[in-house]
Image: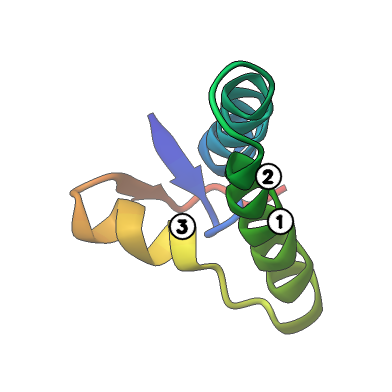
Amino acid sequence: MYVVNGKGNLIRLLAGIFILGSLILAVFVNLYWLLFTAFVGVNLIISSLTGFCLMEKILIKLGTKKNKISF
């Protein structure tokens, strides 16, 4: 998978998985998992306002290729 100009489908996919996963864990395990949901939400807001995306930095460090195609 590619990160498209730093804000690709992979980041959106992972954010959705993290949010849904933490909601499921909050229902069946412990309500404190909602703090993880809030953390993901805050990072999405920061990313939209500043352009800095923590998940993008993590994915690039893990070796995800950065696609140079712009839309």
Residue at x 59% of width, y 30% of height: 13
Taking the image as shown, residue 1 lies to the left or right of residue 40, namely left
Q: Position of residue 55 (x, y in %)?
A: 46, 57
- Label 1 environment density (alpha carbons within 10 Å; few <14, some 14–19, many ≥20): few
Q: Position of residue 27 (x, y in %)?
A: 69, 21
Up-down: is 61 above or below 2?
below
Residue at x 64% of width, y 19% of height: 24
- At label 2, the amino acid type is Leu
Element type where label 1 sits in the image = helix
- Residue hosting label 2: 34
Up-down: is 24 above or below 36?
above
Residue furthest to the front:
30
Label for residue 55? 3
Label for residue 38? 1
| Contact (Cβ within 8 Å) of mark 1 with mark 2 | yes
Question: Residue 44 falls in which quadrant of the image?
Answer: bottom right
Q: Position of residue 47 (x, y in %)?
A: 68, 70
* Distance of label 1 from label 3 (alpha carbons): 15 Å
